[in-house]
Structure formats: structure tokens, C-alpha cells
Image: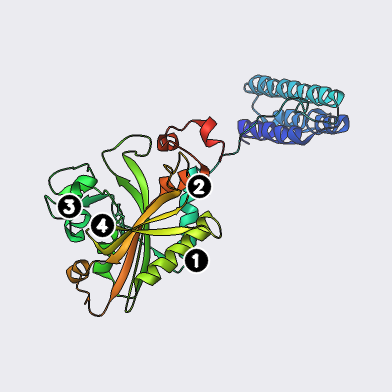
Amino acid sequence: MDWEKKLGELESQVSELLAQAQKAEDFFRIKQQFLGKQGEIAGLLRGIREISPELRPIFGQRINQAKQLLEDRIAEASRQAESRQARGGGETQDLTLPGVWNPPGRIHPISQALDEICEILEDLGFQIADGPEIETDFYNFEALNIPKGHPAREMQDSFYIDDEIVLRTQTSPVQIRVMEKQKPPLRIYAPGRVYRRDMDVSHTPMFHQVEGLWVDGGITFSDLKGVLMLFAERLFGEGTPVRFRPSFFPFTEPSAEVDIGCRICRGEGCRVCGNSGWLEILGAGMVHPGLFRRVEYDPAEYTGFAFGLGVERIAMLKFGINDIRLFFENDLHFLKQF
Ligand code: PHE
């Protein structure tokens, strides 16, 4: 018989039983089972007769050691159980201690605004599309009718990686990337980060835009107006006044900037809207035929509109925030309000 193995087994058996024992009877029973006259240890000691006489003292000593160990363990476990009982209910935890408070997290106001914008566009049947943030000069500018040296490049002070690679300054390059791969009808939106060298109360070097693009046979400026009016009403509440102002973008013709009635002064004129009663929310227009030709769509067959909005701007209007930089300072006093 392998004595060491047998002793080891007895020890782990005792540990297991002790872990479950609670009442005095339990401990008594364990003691009987292992240390009693008819118990396991006694049985081992009886078996010592089979061992050669010269080895007997060694085994005797070893078994007695194990017996002492088990005795100590059982006594200690039963003492602990007793004091648990005395403290009440067998509970090992002090229920009077104050708990650990994990404050619940929140969705960042920019993400909240972005989620809402995306949901509205999904409801209007737009499908999400994606493009790279590190973009080529071709997609970010050239394909959008903004050749090198064009003054429109100055409106979008850019971060260049090298002569041909740029951090995208707008989400409009996604228009080209999608049209290159898909044929009309097409109704997509592209949310994402864009980058410009700018920093003041209304500009940060990184901000978020959402691009919209709808191309099909017979799409008109009225469709653009209808979609954007529905969009503004869902985002800012029913009856929100919407105004289209003529504007210029190299990749749309005609182009417009879209304002909503100032929500602070309800159109009376205040500091936020610069006394005009209106707040700009996005740029839009009918897709320039030059873009279609570049992606091999026939401009005689298809028309479309595009729009691009700044998510920070929308969030500032929605939540009444006057400094865009607050969004990115990660000050909990600010973020906790949303
Ligand atoms: N890309 C333009 C900007 O960033 C916005 C825009 C998008 C205008 C689509 C017209 C059509 O200013």
C-alpha cells in the first residue's frame, strides 16, 4: 500500500467535509470517521503489523503526525464555525459595512447626438457606409471637384501626411468611394471623424460629420428639402422652422446651407444666433454631374442630392453648449449632465 498517498487522500477528504460542516454534530461525525476507535487512522495503525519491524517506527511516527494535523484542523474549523454562529446566522460577512459604490457610466453627448442622427436616417431608409480617415488627396479633394490650388482647399485647412495623403477633412470622399462600387439607386449615410487645423470655441482639430447621399432616376431639389425638413423636425421637434440659403460647394450644384430657427430665442434674435434668429446646421446640394461622370454614372439618367452635417454643432444646439472644446476635455462635471 502507498501510505503517503493514502494519508494525502485522507487529508483532502477531511478538508472537503470541513468546508461543508456547520453544526457541532457535523464536526463530531468527522472526528469519529477519521480519528475514532474504528476510524480511518486507527485502521492504518492496525495495518502496521504487516510492515517489516525495522520500518514500523517510521510509519508509526508519520501516521501520528497526520493524526495530530487532522485533530488540529477539525478543532480549528469547529471553533470558527462556533464563533460564526455566535455572530449570528452563520454569516461571514458584516452586513453593516457600507457598500462599494460603482457610479453608472453614461453615453457621451456626442455619441448620443450621433446615435439619434443615425437612427433618423435609418428610418428614412438610408444605409450606413464607411471610408478611411487617412484618405488620398484624390478622394478628399480631386474627385470632389477641388483640384490643387482651388480656393476651396483653404476653407478646409488640412493635416497632410505627405503630398498625396491627408487626414480627411470631410466625409464627402465616402460619396465617391460608394459610387465607384455601387450602381444607383443608392441611399447611404456615412458617419465618422474628420480633421482640420482649427481650434477655437466652435472648432476642434477632430470633429464628427455625417454625410448623406441619395442617387436615383428623377431625384430633385424638392426631395432634398423634404428629407432635410423631416430630419430637422425629428431632431429638434415638430414645427422646427427650416431655411435653405444659396451657398457654394464644388461638388454640388446648386448648393445650399440649411438653417433651423434658433431654439434659444425662438426666432426673436439673441446672442447665440447672432441676432439673426437662425442657426446653421448643415451644407447640402444636388450632386455635381462631374462627380457622376468620374464614377461612370450617366448624368442624363441619374440625379441625386448630398448633405453633410457636423455632429458637434448639432449636439451644441440640442444641449445648449457654447464651447465645442468642452466635449473633449473629459471633465466629469460636464459629462455628468447628459
Ligand atoms: N463636405 C461639406 C463640408 O464639410 C458639407 C457638404 C456635404 C456639402 C455634402 C454639400 C454636400 O463642409
Report crowding for label 4: few under 14, some 14 to 19, many 20 or more residues within 10 A (C-alpha). Answer: some
Q: Quadrant of the N terminus?
A: top right
**Residue with the mark numbered 3:** 137
> Could you say which disc has been placed on residue 268 in the image?
2
Residue type for callout 4: Phe
Front-most of residues 15 and 131: 131
Does dot 1 land on a helix, a strand or a loop? helix
Does dot 4 land on a helix, a strand or a loop? strand
> Could you say which disc has been placed on residue 123 in the image?
1
* Residue 210 x, y percent position in the rendering: 38, 55
Q: Earlier in the sequence, mark 3 or mark 4?
A: 3
**Residue with the mark numbered 4:** 248
Q: How far is disc 2 from disc 3 in space, using C-alphas?
A: 43 Å
On the question of residue 126 being in view, the answer is: no
Q: Earlier in the sequence, mark 2 or mark 4?
A: 4
Residue 119 horizontal side relative to residue 131, left or right:
right
Report crowding for label 2: few under 14, some 14 to 19, many 20 or more residues within 10 A (C-alpha). Answer: some
Instruction: Assess whether mark 3 and mark 1 are in contact (beta carbons under 8 angstroms).
Output: no
Q: Earlier in the sequence, mark 4 or mark 1?
A: 1
Residue drawn where x is 20% and y is 47% of the image = 166
* Residue 60 x, y percent position in the rendering: 69, 22
Q: Quadrant of the C terminus?
A: top right
Residue type for callout 3: Asp
Residue 240 vs 181, above or below: the answer is: above
Front-most of residues 322 and 210: 322
Residue type for callout 2: Glu
